[in-house]
Amino acid sequence: MEILANVMLGFEVALQPANLFFCFMGVLIGTLVGVLPGLGPVAAMSLLLPTTFHLSPVSAIIMLSGIYYGAMYGGSTTSILVNIPGEAASVVTCLDGYQMARKGRAGAALGIAAFGSFIAGTLSIVGLMLLAPMLAEVALKFGPPEYFCLMLLGLVIVTFLAGSSMPKALLMAAFGLFLGLIGMDIMTATPRFTFDMYFLMDGVGLVPVVMGLFGVSEVLLNVESTIKREIFETKIKGLLPNRKDWRDSTWPIIRGSVVGFFLGILPGGGAVISSFVSYGMEKKLSRHPEKFGTGVIEGVAGPESANNAAAGGAFIPLMTLGIPANAVMAMLLGALTIYGMQPGPMLIKQHPDLFWGVVTSMYIGNIMLLVLNLPLIGIWVKILKIPYEVLFPLILLFCLIGVFSLNNNVGEIGLMLFFGGVGYFMKKFNYEAAPLVLAMVLGPMMENALRQSLIMANGSAAIFFTRPISLAVALLVLILLVLPMLPWVKKKREVIAEIVE
Amino acid sequence: MKNNDQRSSLVWLVIGLSIALYSGKYGLGTFSIPGPGFLPFVSGAAMVLLSLIVFFQQFSKGRADTLKSLWTRTRWQTVLMVMASLVLYAVLLRALGFILDTFVLTAFLLRVMEPLSWKKVLAGATGATLGSYAIFELWLEAQLPAGLLGF
């Protein structure tokens, strides 16, 4: 019954006119960046972060979350119509979605993607409602040593699940950790690696780094590629999947939701991985696996449900432990701290309106997305047709002004451009940016947890191995680091890496 | 040098090494009371170790490729021009002011990929400048620099 009261509270918050408006803005912008290749949810959220400073924290988080799950919706549109994934999470949707479009079934593909996303989004919100408060209860027992080990585990899982080689991903995490430590050391007030640049005193800003790595660098790569996009020119008709489509898709949607939700909880690329896992699973379970890749609807319904469910699951570590699971959640963590809220096990208790309001707003947002994506699909297709040479100056302009308006500081633009260049080379040489961003956010938190743990133990590092929970987590970290060296795991990982490429 | 993973790993090796060495300046502390330089040192050292792993891994696996192969059939000149124009924009922002600086930048960017007609470029640059000015200065009150034109 307590849950029911909480849900009522949530709807009360989410249905306030202002919050409805910002929810709508969020999913609208999310769909837009999902549709536009080369501008993802992370860049869009960092772009809009400064504009949310004068909103209430609840409205701001509602809008920022809307961008995230809205982008998951929008990404499928480009996959199906153009064979270019708008988001990494909808890469697999290209396989069967585009083939369906070529067979004249674009409508059914778009329709099942939207309905599947809606159902999965809804199921994962229910999961979030049930699981998050329970986990938060458990997390109350955690002290600094447990947190330190958990954050370490998060980083290792991210690199373990990374598509490319694990050493390269770990390398990026180490570099990100260093970036997070730049600035004033809280304990001793020593400015570290600031080189007398005043704007680095507070640390390297998350927004300029993220916009550089995910916004500017993406534009640079698109500008140099000579590939022309071709939009599939057919009349899209019949958005409603027929009865046979539904029969074929029901189980893939349900399985995709469950898989997506639980993989989403794990740190690192939850949405991306879960869409691949769901596709693989449907192919294995199917009575006609040979038809996958030729335009079967299960190949769209499963992965599209999985990536949306994962978006919901990803909120759990942030809302219960205060540890972000991916770059998007790192942005939300940054936002919460700016508004003076400490994400962690107390968040749900201290700010019930925030947690339940945001969760129920996701439900409302899912309904809005259904309306935005099905009847208004024509508008999104038109936007897709804007040529890139007209689009990219606007994207760059928004990045420039957005970063500048953070603190009215030209130095931050410089920082963004620097990381734009770094990100460009990282993509060229196949280094992933996600572990870097995550480690950068976790860096200062890890340092604090480490110091507090050592103070608790009078300077003995044994504390990490004498407390049962932190010992278990530490062992898990070790296992994950050793596992990729075993031959059969190595093979499996290489197969996954090949699919991702 | 066998491939680009090896080449890039050497760059990270140098960066990691500099971080680790420079951290000493801030004081590493002892293991029981870590100083301000402790964790930066650990991250730098980890980078050194990992870049060495990447480097030596490539001998047994990985295909050979050249640095040049990353930029064949790309318009890398465009990337350079775009990047240069963005840096110039940042440098001149205070002096020229938002409106003038932004107008010049967008006009340049609109020409750099595909030469659009000048009429379209002018219309696009004017629209983008005034539109962003309206959003950020008038609506969000971002206090963009006035510069030469005085507003």
Image (cartoon, coloured by chain):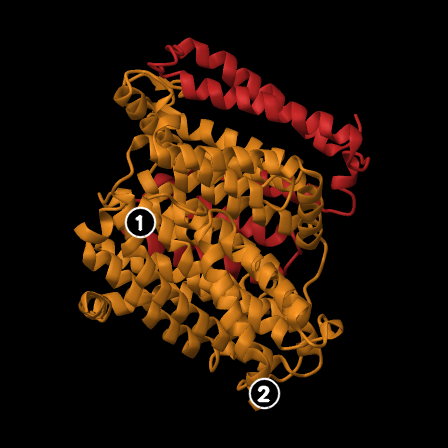
Chain colours: A orange, B red
- Provide the secondary structure element on which disc 1 rests: helix
Left or right: B31, with A224 as reference point: left
Q: Is residue B145 above or below residue B21?
A: below
* Residue B21 seen in render: yes
Of labels 2 and 1, the one closer to you: 1
Q: Residue at x 51, y 62 (%)?
A: A259
Using the rendered image, report if marks 2 and 1 lie on a common chain.
Answer: yes
Q: Position of residue A348 (x, y in %)?
A: 23, 53
Corner quadrant of residue A145: top left
Q: How many marks?
A: 2
Circle 1 is placed at which residue position? A320
Q: Chain of mark 2?
A: A
Specify the quadrant that holds the N terminus of chain A.
Answer: bottom left
Q: Nearer the viewer, residue A481 or A165?
A: A481
Q: Residue at x 36, y 39 (%)?
A: B147
Q: Position of residue A179 (x, y in %)?
A: 45, 29
User: What amino acid is labelled 2 in the image?
Assistant: Lys
Q: Chain of mark 1?
A: A
Q: Residue at x 41, y 73 (%)?
A: A369
- Provide the secondary structure element on which disc 2 rests: loop
Circle 2 is placed at which residue position? A237
- Tag 1 or tag 2, which sits nearer the N-term? 2
Q: Position of residue A119 (x, y in %)?
A: 44, 74
* Residue A71 seen in render: no
Q: Residue at x 49, y 24 (%)?
A: B43
Q: Nearer the viewer, residue A250 or B69?
A: A250
User: What amino acid is labelled 1 in the image?
Assistant: Thr
Q: Residues within 10 Å of mark 1 (few under 14, many from 20)?
A: many
Left or right: A432, with A317 as reference point: right
